[in-house]
């Protein structure tokens, strides 16, 4: 139906169309609806022994052989499962780490439903489960499972996918406990109790409540956020101002015997393509402890380095400008405050002084 609704190019004329195949599936399923058991429903397989019929066994064995060839490469371990799309390259993501769990469970189920395949599948499950167990001694708890089952040294990865895959591999060994019998049901010896209301909210502890607590943002929240924003801004600007003052103090302390002050970084870029001479380069980098290079030594000439240096210099220039503006702003503000204090008349005890900018009430 998806292909038909997406107007996917039709198959060749000797094959049914997408819509015809969807209609066929529906009609076949509808005709097999069983009202005699379980209040109505579809059976998990059409015929009790269809998987042992040669009609189905031939394609099944083909799929099985290809799976074992593809995902258990002999070059990466004897009958050890490998996620070949990413594991050899170290590029597995969160989804990839779960795929082993599905495949090994499907193989175990195949051995249950088609007992003639058990002798083929079992050695692969056994070897892979041993490899998975060898990866489950990592982490700080000594029980964290990795993903490379062809090594007994923990590969350093961890997560739900790795745990799922290792658990599925080890758990699949249970298929031999009861002579590879079919999956249990309530009628054939299954003992796990059920809870029809589980997860519906009627018997659930959470009663279907959201996992994340939320509430409406009020005026107080907005005011608090505004205050915090203002404090962060003041601290940022104040820090820039203090840094600027410190830089000025460092410049004032220069007695002329040390390297020249760092006033112009552009000299560094201009001299990068020139032969090295003493005193060239960035004046901020000159230091008596740095040995002088010979005249034949050339400085960096890689364009990428030049561009990076230019970008860094532009950023430093911008920082200097902003710091100076911030400093000027605060200096002028302090000057205005000092001037206003010196002009103000002293207030006598018991008297009131009105701000001339305020108007009397009434």
Image (cartoon, helix red, strand yellow):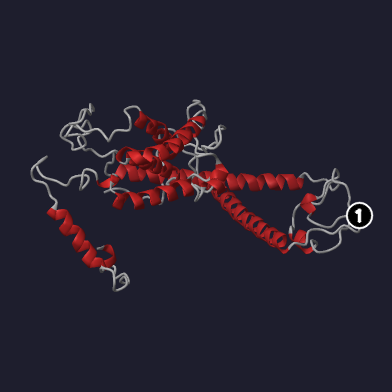
Residue closest to the far right? 295
Task: Indicate left or right for 146 with 287 as reference.
Answer: left
| Residue in the image at 30% along x and 50% along y | 54
Element carrying mark 1: loop
Percent position of residue 200, x then y: 18, 38
Q: Nearer the viewer, residue 144 or 217?
A: 144
User: Quick one: label 1, few (<14), some, or many (20+) residues within 10 Å?
Assistant: few
- The quarter of the picture where residue 301 lies is bottom right
Image height check: is 281 above or below 82?
Answer: below
Q: Which of 13 and 324 is in front in this view?
A: 13
| Residue in the image at 78% along x and 55% along y | 282
Image height check: is 336 above or below 351?
Answer: below
Task: Indicate left or right for 90 with 178 as reference.
Answer: right
Q: Can residue 359 be seen in this view?
A: no
Image height check: is 239 above or below 328?
Answer: above
Percent position of residue 198, x then y: 20, 34
| Residue in the image at 48% along x and 49% along y | 70
Residue closest to the far bottom? 13
Residue closest to the far front? 54
Identify the residue under disc 1.
Answer: 294
- The quarter of the picture where residue 250 lies is top right
Percent position of residue 227, x then y: 41, 43
| Residue in the image at 21% along x and 43% along y | 48
Percent position of residue 350, x then y: 40, 33
């Amino acid at each position: 139906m998806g292909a038909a609704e997406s107007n996917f190019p039709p198959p060749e004329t000797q094959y049914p169309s997408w819509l015809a195949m969807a209609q066929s599936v529906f009609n076949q399923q509808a005709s097999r609806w069983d009202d005699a058991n379980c209040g109505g429903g579809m059976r998990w397989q059409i015929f009790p022994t269809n998987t042992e019929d040669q009609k189905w066994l031939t394609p099944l064995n083909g799929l099985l052989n290809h799976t074992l060839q593809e995902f258990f490469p002999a070059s990466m371990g004897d009958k050890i499962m490998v996620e070949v799309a990413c594991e050899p390259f170290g590029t597995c993501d969160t989804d990839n780490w779960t795929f082993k769990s599905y495949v090994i469970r499907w193989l175990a189920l195949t051995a249950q439903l088609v007992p003639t395949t058990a002798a083929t599948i079992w050695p692969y499950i056994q070897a892979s489960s041993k490899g998975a167990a060898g990866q489950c001694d990592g982490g700080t708890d000594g029980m964290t499972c990795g993903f490379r089952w062809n090594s007994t040294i923990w590969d350093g990865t961890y997560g739900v996918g790795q745990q799922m895959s290792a658990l599925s591999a080890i758990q699949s060994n249970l298929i031999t406990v009861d002579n590879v019998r079919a999956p249990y049901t309530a009628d054939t010896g299954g003992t796990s109790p059920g809870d029809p209301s589980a997860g519906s909210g009627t018997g659930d502890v959470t009663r279907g409540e959201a996992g994340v607590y939320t509430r409406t943002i009020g005026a107080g929240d907005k005011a608090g956020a505004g205050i915090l924003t203002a404090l962060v801004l003041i601290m940022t600007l104040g820090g820039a101002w203090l840094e600027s003052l410190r830089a000025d103090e460092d410049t004032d302390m220069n007695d002329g015997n040390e390297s020249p002050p760092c006033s112009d970084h552009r000299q560094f870029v201009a001299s990068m393509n020139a032969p090295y001479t003493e005193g060239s380069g960035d004046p901020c980098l000159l230091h008596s402890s740095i040995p002088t290079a010979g005249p034949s030594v050339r400085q960096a000439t890689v364009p990428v380095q030049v561009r990076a240096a230019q970008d860094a210099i532009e950023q430093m220039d911008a920082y200097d400008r902003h710091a100076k503006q911030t400093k000027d702003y605060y200096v002028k503000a302090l000057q205005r405050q000092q001037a206003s204090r010196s002009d103000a008349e002293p207030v006598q005890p018991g008297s009131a002084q009105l701000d001339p900018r305020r108007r009397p009430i009434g």
